[in-house]
Image (cartoon, grey):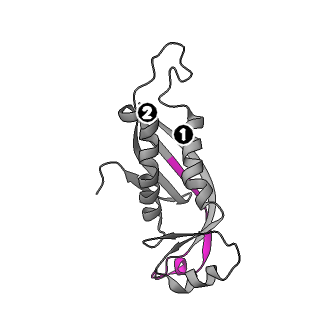
Amino acid sequence: MHITRRLEFDAGHRIPNHGSQCRHLHGHRYAIEITLCGPVVATTGAADEGMVMDFSEVKAIAQKHVVELWDHAFLAWREDRAVVDFLAAIPDHKTVLFDAPPTAEHLAQTAFRLLDPLYRSRYGAKLELQQVRLYETPNCWADAVRGDA
């Protein structure tokens, strides 16, 4: 059985080598969808009986380890020195640095790597993160899927 939980957050970024508008500082209303796969809990009387995982727990983990960190932050590539130095000059600015340009593809892969061990630790081998879908806009998204290179 597969289940999916969607969360939303706002963040700024830029893709410095982009040939068009995305090279400029700008922001998005991102959405992230977490898809988990596992058996439906059949333990009679268990709080999560009939569920793969309680949706509130799916949300709590993604909220704490991705959304709270990235929400209302500027997502920057650490090699984009002009932007990194500019943001460092703003007192208490919320900046998250990445090892690659903060494209939807890279953000989806990063979120997958962050979340995978956290969901697995909750239910062990019975629960597996299958996919992280990160929407940069309502019409554009990237999927990080288990097993992709």
The answer to which image quadrant residue 110 occupies is bottom left
The answer to which image quadrant residue 100 occupies is bottom left
What is the distance, in whole Å, between disc 2 and disc 1 at their CAs?
12 Å
Q: Which residues are magenta?
A: 14-33
Q: Residue at x 46, y 41 (%)?
A: 119
Q: Does residue 101 sit above or below 34 in this rendering?
A: below
Q: Amino acid at mark 2?
A: Tyr
> 50 or 138, which is in the foreground?
50
Question: Of marks 2 and 1, which one's residue comes earlier in the chain?
Answer: 1
Residue 116: x, y in percent?
42, 47
Residue 115: x, y in percent?
46, 49
> 136 or 50, which is in the foreground?
50
Q: Residue at x 47, y 68 (%)?
A: 103
Q: Residue at x 38, y 31 (%)?
A: 126
User: Which numbered disc covers residue 58?
Assistant: 1
Q: Is residue 87 magenta?
A: no
Residue 109: x, y in percent?
41, 58
User: Which numbered disc covers residue 123?
Assistant: 2
